[in-house]
Amino acid sequence: MTPGPRGARRLDRYAPPAPARASRRWRNSLRTTVLAGGLAIFTVWTLFPFVWVLETSLKSNRDIFQEVTLVPRHVTLQHYTALFHQSEFLTYFKNSAIVAVSTTVIAMLVGVLAAYAITRLSFRGRAFIGNATIVTYLAPPALLFIPLFQVAYQFHLTDRALGLIPIYLIFSAPFCTWLAITYFRTIPSELEDAALVDGATRLRSLVSIFLPLSLPALAVIALFAFTNAWNEFLFALLLIARDSQKTVPVGLAQFIIGDVFQWGPLMAGALVASLPPVLIYTVAQRWVVAGLASGATKG
Amino acid sequence: MVTVLGTRPLRVAHVRPWKERLLGRDWRMAWLFLAPLVVIIVALIAYPFLSGIVLSLQHKVIGGPATWVGLQNYRDLLFGDQYGATFRKTVWVSLVYTATAVAAKLCLGLCAALLLNEQFRGRSLMRGILFLPWTVPTVVVALTWRWVYDGTPSGLLNLIRIEAFRSHTLVQFLADPHLALWSVIAVVVWQGTPFYTMMFIAGLQAIPAEQYEAAAIDGAGVLQRFRYVLLPGLAATMVITVLLSTIWTANSINFVYVLTRGGPVNATMTFPMLAYEVGIAGARQLGTAAAVSVIFFPLFIVLIYFLTKRMLAPEAQA
């Protein structure tokens, strides 16, 4: 209910002098306008490509290419049917899942062990290996892709999906190590010292003290590692030619025949390919911000 | 650089065997735990790094034998007839591409973070929405925008021009040499901004509320609080974010690869794309392609050095 003139006048008695009040009201409405306007612009800018993908994936080819309209006249699922029944998309999806999950599991194991050693054990070269981890995590793989291409040939990692796993570990392992370091450092060492005095082994203390305490953090690290591997394109493109071994990002290209783009199935595939990372991030958004705050990530 | 990455429990002093004195108390277990990481770093980063440098001094075609050519590849790139002009163009395009994209992401990311840091209903939903582009695979983003930019009446932007503005011409966003680079940069900014937004939100949350209140009591206006509380408080985060983003933006190949392949007439040829075109596509000259990357090594080594120092600095720790 908006107060009428009388109500407003009654409130006046307790209100600050007129000029200050007017300026505050003006400032409040300015704040609301800027906030709403800014958010509206950002929302449109962010969402319009998604709407366009969804719309294209639901249009018939006639509506896409011949009688083009902004708003689709008919909704059809034909492109999704084509995607799942007339293409190898499910194979790509399976390959992507295997590669991304394996990379994540291995990178987490490597990262947790290394981070424990770097934060909690005393040995010569600790500072050096800590720095080396950050440097390798920061070094962009694309800078090394020509020699890596050659190395992959030497190690026979080409043309099989599983061969991508060691390549993906290049960025996932140092990355998981660095994030795990930032979390392990926040765990007070007294906790572990007590256990060690009681006769627990190092491995035992890692498993029963460190891991339970940093479980939420480790989940976020796993998320980053998984989506990095799921989204990777360059090395999958360079190393894999056989259709049965392709991952989703590369497999999408099969709807491009020469210069002809089959936009219907392509956009349907794009949508399905985005679902795993988008769902994961939407669920875990709050922890992701906290994770970014403590370690930063590849983006 | 000496960095203390953890604390070491106190122990009762006793005479330790010489190995422990030399290598540290827990050296056996430490290197056992570190072994997998060390293998990955050596085999997949240090070795390719060095072999990249060696490769750049050779003439080599994929599958063929390598012959030593000294600095010939570098001479070809910098002054040669075949690559000279293209390479110089590539340096310029990479610079414009990286600088513009990073600057735009910084501005937009800061604006979005300031908006999302305000209190309002539906804030976490808005954060989720503005975060979306960053979660989508880059290839999907690139394909989507290629379709948005499509040069036929079917492409979204041209369709809007025709339907809403009654335009009779088609704009070739990706095929026009004057537009292509800016079109690609817009896509990079679209996907990259949420990373800045999230980093800045995290950074803003770390600024103590008392600082704002103290400034407000002292009579500081919105702009003054921005200038004297917010910017200094966010400086560390900004430096780290910009350095990270500069390294990754400069080295990203996915957008250019899917959108333009470096064309039209090299208008969008960034250096990773050139390395790809020289080494993998067309000529398959691995040596020359390796040289393209190696020329840029020193720049990124400097950036990584500064960033490493920054990330280890105490004020960067959450």
Image (tube, coloured by chain):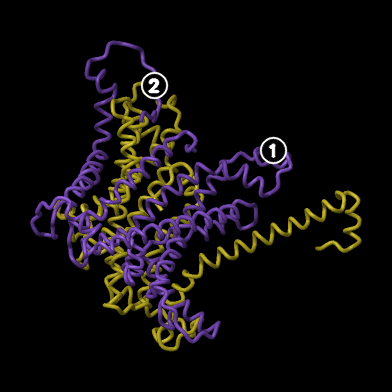
Placement of the N terminus of chain B among the 4 image quadrants = top left
Secondary structure at numbered mark 2:
loop
Residue at image coords 33%, 61%: B270
Residue B183 vs residue A244: left or right? right
Q: Residues within 10 Å of mark 1 (few under 14, many from 20)?
A: few
Residue at image coords 55%, 82%: B164
Q: Chain of mark 2?
A: B
Q: Is B16 or A131 nearer to us in this picture?
A: A131
Residue A108 can be seen, yes or no? no
Residue B130 vs residue A7: left or right? left
Label of residue B214 in the image: 1
Q: Is residue B57 above or below residue B208?
A: below
* Residue A104: % across, % down: 32, 49
Q: Is residue A17 above or below residue A79?
A: above
Label of residue B9 in the image: 2
* Residue A296: % across, % down: 43, 46
Residue A132 vs residue B47: left or right? right
